[in-house]
Image: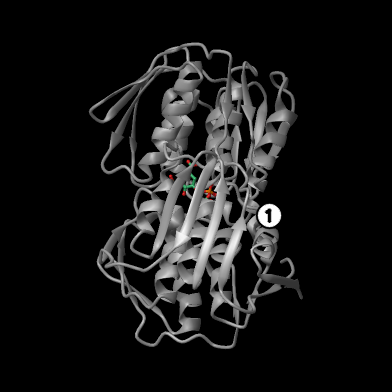
């Protein structure tokens, strides 16, 4: 466990800042896999500083040029879900024997649907510990048996993205049928768009996505800054008395579904202007808020929005939160435990979660636990606008997606002191 920090904000809550966010970890991790599959024909610009991206990049560099057979190489992704899922598919068709593992939490995050799909395709994968979960042993005798695979869409879109990225490299290509509901759909669309940029055509008909065997083209993929990281600045703008925050290089036409934060935050009083080189946020008055927000397409925004709504005393309801329980931590439970510290309840109903802010109160000091979850730290940090001293447990946890988060808060006038 790392060190804690005390976060505070003194004086008038008028925030003026320009914050250059790191690249999207989702786009970066796709770009890295696509680049590796293309034998580096595809180049990447503005790669993220996120530890999840640095980890994947180091792994791909270490294993590139590896030859058949030999001993098992251990590949450790730490907490990086996308790296685990994307590498499961990528290593299935790579040369070499791999033991693919991750953090304690990673060993509790399910991977069965992806492993089964790959096994049906012809991959030689087995579970090294518990069935259905990492770590995995992946061998190199991939022989494609079929191009037709069905996969349930409601657990993680990352499984589908992982399969689609290797599809053009499969001798027979892939026809991927999505069964049932699809969660996190914009991430799947991001995968297809980035493949398209790299010259890979697809056809999405009904519930099935077809990708033929084909070659990548030489190109540069430029990663946009991270909209999930931007969401914490929207929360700050919504909670401050006044805010004028510029976030360079974010685009209106984004591949990231989390850009929806610009719409979601309008009723919270935050207006977004698209300026020539980025976006500008301005705080204003809140307007009537939709009572039920469906976050199925943007699960990584859930903590930002729920904590911000709680701090504003808004008794909103949320749907589409099913997948939060299998992310870096059980995010529903983590939210419930930490929101209780400001007197707010997050009540679980039948597929609907509702905030009860009747007893909202900000103590003078509070310590928030972070549960090995970067988004817990970043979602709760803005509460230092109301609480004199917010102690954040294991504050470096933010490194997973946004290593400069605390430095950026300091730029905006917050104080962050390691304790
Ligand atoms: O494909 C991606 O880059 C991601 C997809 C989402 O996961 P699920 O598809 O598991 O919801 C999201 O929560 C994660 O942070 C990144
Ligand atoms: C869920 C997340 O990441 P991953 O699934 O890639 O670990 C996240 O960044 O919020």
Residue at image coords 51%, 17%: 169
Q: Quadrant of the C terminus?
A: bottom right
Res. 70 in view:
yes
Q: In which quarter of the image is the N terminus?
A: bottom right
In the picture, measured across the screen, residue 140 lies left or right of residue 189, that is right
Nearest the viewer among 294 and 106 is: 294
In the picture, measured across the screen, residue 54 lies left or right of residue 361, that is right
Nearest the viewer among 258 and 91 is: 258
In the picture, measured across the screen, residue 120 lies left or right of residue 37, that is left
Question: In the current view of this chain or complex, which residue is farthest to the left?
Answer: 206
Q: In which quarter of the image is residue 256?
A: top left
Q: In this view, does 67 lie above or below 396?
A: above
Residue designated by label 1: 404
Q: Is residue 4 above or below residue 116?
A: below
x and y percentages locating residue 145 in the rendered image: 42, 18
The mark total stands at 1
Residue at image coords 51%, 19%: 198
x and y percentages locating residue 255 in the rendered image: 44, 36
Res. 119 in view:
no
Q: Quadrant of residue 248?
A: top right
Determine whether the residue tagged by mark 1 lies in a helix, strand or loop. Answer: loop
x and y percentages locating residue 171 in the rendered image: 47, 12
Q: In which quarter of the image is residue 31?
A: top right
Nearest the viewer among 208 and 53 is: 53
């Amino acid at each position: 466990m790392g060190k804690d920090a005390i976060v505070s904000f003194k004086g008038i809550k008028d925030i003026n800042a320009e914050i250059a966010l790191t690249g999207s970890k989702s786009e970066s991790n796709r770009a890295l896999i696509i680049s590796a599959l293309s034998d580096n024909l595809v180049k990447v610009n503005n790669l993220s500083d996120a530890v999840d991206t640095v980890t994947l990049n180091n792994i791909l560099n270490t294993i590139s040029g590896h030859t058949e057979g030999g001993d098992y190489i251990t590949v450790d992704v730490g907490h990086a879900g996308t790296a685990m899922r994307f590498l499961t598919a990528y290593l299935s068709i790579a040369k070499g024997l791999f033991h693919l593992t991750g953090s304690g939490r990673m060993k509790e995050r399910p991977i069965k649907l992806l492993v089964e799909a790959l096994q049906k395709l012809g991959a030689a994968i087995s579970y090294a510990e518990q069935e259905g979960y990492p770590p995995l042993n992946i061998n190199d005798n991939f022989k494609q048996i079929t191009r037709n695979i069905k996969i349930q869409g409601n657990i993680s879109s990352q499984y589908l993205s992982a399969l689609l990225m290797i599809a053009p490299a499969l001798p027979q290509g892939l026809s991927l049928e999505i069964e049932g509901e699809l969660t996190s759909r914009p991430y799947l669309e991001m995968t297809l768009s980035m493949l398209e940029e790299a010259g890979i055509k697809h056809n999405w008909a009904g519930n099935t996505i077809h990708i033929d065997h084909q070659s990548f083209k030489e190109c540069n993929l430029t990663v946009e800054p991270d909209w999930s990281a931007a969401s914490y600045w929207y929360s700050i703008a919504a909670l401050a008395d006044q805010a004028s925050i510029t976030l360079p290089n974010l685009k209106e036409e984004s591949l990231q579904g989390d850009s929806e934060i610009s719409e979601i935050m309008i009723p919270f009083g935050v207006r977004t202007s698209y300026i020539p080189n980025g976006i500008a946020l301005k705080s204003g008055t809140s307007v009537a808020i939709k009572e039920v927000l469906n976050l199925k397409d943007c699960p990584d925004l859930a903590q930002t929005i729920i904590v911000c709504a709680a701090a504003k005393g808004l008794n909103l309801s949320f749907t589409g939160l099913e997948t939060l329980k299998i992310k870096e931590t059980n995010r529903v439970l983590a939210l419930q435990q930490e929101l209780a510290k400001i007197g707010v309840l997050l009540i679980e109903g039948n597929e609907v979660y509702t905030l009860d802010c009747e007893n909202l109160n900000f103590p003078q000091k509070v310590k928030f636990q972070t549960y090995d979850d970067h988004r817990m730290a970043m979602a709760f940090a803005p509460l230092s606008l109301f609480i004199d001293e917010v102690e954040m447990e294991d504050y470096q946890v933010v490194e997973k997606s946004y290593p400069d988060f605390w430095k950026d808060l300091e730029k905006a006038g917050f104080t962050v002191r390691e304790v």
